[in-house]
Amino acid sequence: MNLSEDCLKGLEVLADEKIVPNEAFRALIDCCFDVVLKHETESALFENSSLKNVDVIALKQTYSAFIIFILETMKSNIDNSVITHTLEDHKLSSNRIQVIIQYFNQNRIAIRKVLSITNFHYPHIIDVNWRLDYFMKSNSIEKVNTPVYLINLTTEKEEGEKGEVEFACTLDQLQDLVFKLRDAQKQIERSSIKS
Amino acid sequence: MTHQFQNFYLFVTDLDNTTFLCTSSSDLISIHIKMIIVLDSHHTEDLQFLKTVENDVIREFCNISLEFIRKGDNKKLYIAASKKLNVSPDVIENVVKGLSHLFVECSRFMLNDADFKDSLSILKFENELVDLLKEVYLEQRNEIRIILQELYPHFDHYSNLEWRLDVQVANRSLRGQTINPIYLLKLTTQSGGTQEKKEHILQTDPNNLKHLCNELEAALMEIRSNDCRRIMRNIK
């Protein structure tokens, strides 16, 4: 694990019980995990009453260092013993290390899940709506009498950013579409049997 | 049995023409309602020109008219034809538009050959000429109807789907020990009435794909449901 010098310095400040008292330490760690998990935003750091007495520069330094620490360790899925070693090397007391390890135990899977979707991607299909019309006539043609499907795909680009793709198809075209999608869906079963 | 002599009067209306038809009750029982396209005086006049030319030329006119229905105006064709026949391009244009109107209106209402012939009776064409036009009409009716249908709906139409199954193994913020299957889908759609194709690159995961399949399959099943069948049977 390669941590920058700024990050290591920040961890040492975090170890200093005079600058960061126990109560503030707990609040800070809690806040960092919440931010990484996207439960909170950074502004929570300055609203927390337990952190009011901590020097602002030290607070920012420790906060950024610990955020980097969480992201880097979780990026490579580093196990608890290595984390303990690294923290011991930077003079954190065993009590504090215990607290941090507990947070990692609780949130490891959730954080890695967040990291796995922290990426760019194509619009992701999350839902589909359909409507079946019976096309009888229009201003330019009569006696058509054929079914027409209207398909509406709901997509998501970033989290919460919805989009849609809308198109019409005839019965034959829909059969073609479903056939291809089923084939695609079966492929994953075929692949998993082979491997 | 007075009603044996009774006649039924039917109004056949389309956008710009109204036709009065008279039929006997026995005809009506055989459920054949006559359908006639009434050409207005402009079209009738324009089409008189066809009486003066050879069959080959008429065929050529039919071809140009079909081209007009497919792609719209082409002034160059009119000018070329007008030089050959030694008339003004306007005459050619009017004949082409008259013929196109005839074909489109007849296709629109799916006229059968007898009705088509009756619609032409007002023009007082020779039988040979009527047969020629009828032949072209019956030959081209399906294609013309497809063209007319494309105008609706103005939505994009499904054209093709290609898919690819990827497994994401790492990204900038996450290394190792993850397998994240992603389906990449390339959906091609065609916008109504034109040849213009659009490509949508989309992705989805196995769970959502399964949901998508199930929903669309339900849509396909719906058409075989009793409700749906009843509606389709009753709309003729």
Image (cartoon, grey):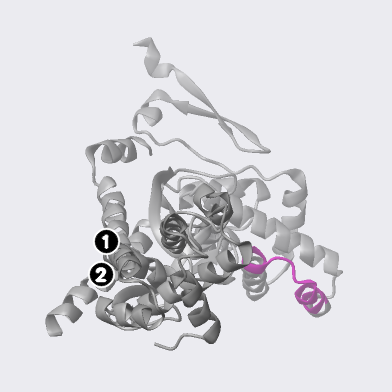
Badge 1 crowding class, 10 Å Cα cut-off, few under 14, some 14 to 19, many 20 or more, is some
Q: Which residue in the protein does label 2 denote?
A: A185
What residue occupies the far left of the structure in this picture? A193
Q: Which of A31 and A153 is in front in this view?
A: A31
Where does the image place residue B98, in percent across and percent down from the top left?
70, 56
Residue A9 visible in image: yes
Where does the image place residue A42, in percent across and percent down from the top left?
55, 59
Where does the image place residue B154, in percent across and percent down from the top left?
57, 54
Q: Nearer the viewer, residue B113 or A43?
A: A43
Quarter of the image with the C terminus of chain A in it: bottom left
Residue B154 visible in image: no
Q: Which of B77 and A31 is in front in this view?
A: A31
Question: How far is mark 1 from mark 2, CA to CA?
Answer: 7 Å
Q: Which residue in the protein does label 1 denote?
A: B210
Residue B127 horizontal side relative to residue A35, left or right: right
What residue occupies the far right of the structure in this picture? B88
Q: Which of B169 and B41 is in front in this view?
A: B169
Q: What stretch is highlighted in magenta?
A: B68-82
Residue at the spot 27% in from the left edge and 36% down from the top edge: B227
Residue at the spot 58% in from the left edge and 68% down from the top edge: A58
Would you say the magenta stretch is mainly helix, strand or loop?
A: helix
Where does the image place residue A26, in percent across and percent down from the top left?
41, 58
C-beta proximity under 8 Å, tags 1 and 2: yes
The three-letter code of the residue at mark 2 reads Gln
Mark 2: secondary structure: helix
What residue occupies the far bottom of the structure in this picture? A2
Residue at the spot 48% in from the left edge and 66% down from the top edge: A123
Residue at the spot 41% in from the left edge and 72% down from the top edge: A70
